[in-house]
Structures are given as structure tokens and as C-alpha cells.
Amino acid sequence: MDLHLQGKNVLITGGSSGIGLAVARKYAQEGANIAIWARGAERALSESASIEKEFNVQAKGISCDVTKMDSIEQAMEATLAFFGGIDILINNAGTGSEETVMEASDEKWQYYWDLHVMAAIRTSRLAVPSMKKRGGGVIIQTASICAKQPLWYEPIYNTTKAALVMFSKCLANELIKENIRVVTISPGLVLTSDWWKTAGILSEKEGITAKEYLDGIAHKNAPIDRFASPEEIAEFYAFIGSGKASYCVGSNYSIDGGWLAVID
């Protein structure tokens, strides 16, 4: 299927690893130009150079800490200078947490709020004027199955991802008149470095290996009985960002191997 993404300008936050990198590579494979934002400048530059060489598209790596407004502004300025405009924004930056509600500090709550919610708000506000000038665009937010079905050990992650879903719905209603579609994707079990990090912490507490912990998580939660690869998830990101999904507005799409326990 030709998704007609060739020549589109795509900005992906948290794009140097995991789901973000897989999505960046998939869009580049479809012929889109790619801007990767990541906290680690060296990784962002390395991955963007690799994408540019492999797929013969324009690609740029930009250092950005999306928890800080001044960093977002600088990164957006560099992106617009490079591209001239943005067609598709993918707010993907984020990470898991591990705490209890009663023990987590205000500072930790604020950090994850800035990372998962305010980053998407700020980046969207800065990207939208460019999309309006280009006649429309697409904003895709990466939420999580945990926005609906929380995991016990990360209440901050659960809460902030749920807020991101609601923000996206509100933004979708506001922007569709400008021909800008906003949607949310909520992955389930995707085998990224974040999951290995979490498994390393929790498996040690249980006296098992990280792999044993991950296998147990998949068996317990996903009827498909395995984790997805980032590349599997990236296929859906490419479709939903394309004109083939032109009637998809404001919805939250679960890609979870059957994990969600209710009809949605």
C-alpha cells in the first residue's frame, strides 16, 4: 500500500531509540523527511545520519529536553529552519516510572507531568502554525495501555498518560477545522530498553532474571503471549499519519496484543 508519505516532513520526539526510532525509520522508508529530537545529542545525530544514508531522505538529529520550554523552543526553531514546515508531529518522548502514590515526591510528579503532558502541549502549540500554513497536518501522541488499565507499580506514569489521552481529544476537537488531525496511540507490551530497565529493577526484587520477568509479564497480560517489536508498532504509526487514515480524528488506538480487558 502506498501511503503517499513521500516528501512529508515528520518530527518525532524521543526518536533516537525504541518506538520512536522504529517510527522514524518506517516513515523514512516511506520517503518522508525526518527530524529526531532526543536528550542525547550524539545518539540523535548518529541515528539521523544513518536514516539519511539508508533511505536517501533528509534527516536531522536535534538535542532537546522536552521537559523544558526553552529547549523545546530552540529545537522547534532548528526544525523549522531545516524543514521549512512540519506535516506530521509525533509526541513520543516519555518513560516509565516506579513508585507508590504515598511515597512519590511532588518533584517526581512534576517531572513526569512535564515529560508526558506539558511536552505534548508545548510542542503541539509550536508546530500547529506551520501546519496551518501548509494546509493541514497530523499530530500523533504516544500514550499507553496504562492510561486505561494501570500497572500497580507506576501510578505517575498511569496518571500522566491518561491525561495525555484527554488532552489529545480536546486538541483534536479544536484543530480539525484547520484540517489538522490529532490521534493517540496506546501501545501495550513493546520490547524496548525501558522495559528491560523496568524488568531489571523488579526482577531483582523477585529473585529472577529480567528475561524471566518479561516472559511472565507477557504470559500474564497479553493473550498473544509475547511482546511486540517496535517495528510492528511503527507500521500502525505510518498508516495513521497518512491520508489513508483521513477519517481518524480524536480517537485513542490500543495496540496491545489483546491486553485491554474491556471492550473499547
Image (cartoon, rainbow, N blue to C red):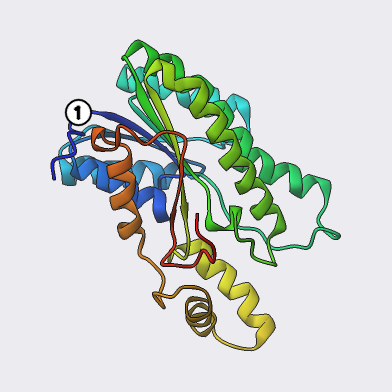
Residue at (31% x, 59% y) in the render: 232
Residue pointed to by mark 1: 7
Asked if residue 67 shows in the view, the reply is no
Image quadrant where residue 138 sits: top left
Q: Secondary structure at mark 1?
A: loop
Residue at (59% x, 55% y) in the render: 148
Residue at (53% x, 27% y) in the render: 171
163 vs 253, left or right, is right
- Camera-side residue: 139 or 73? 139
- Camera-side residue: 179 or 106? 179
Could you say where residue 17 lies in the image, as x and y percent from the top left?
41, 53
Asked if residue 44 shows in the view, the reply is yes
Could you say where residue 58 lies in the image, as x and y percent from the top left?
23, 32
Question: For the view shown, which residue lies furthest in the bottom direction?
Answer: 207
Say how many tags the image has. Answer: 1
Q: What amino acid does circle 1 point to?
A: Gly
Question: For the view shown, which residue lies furthest in the right direction?
Answer: 102
Could you say where residue 40 lies in the image, as x and y percent from the top left?
48, 45
Could you say where residue 159 lies in the image, as x and y percent from the top left?
68, 50
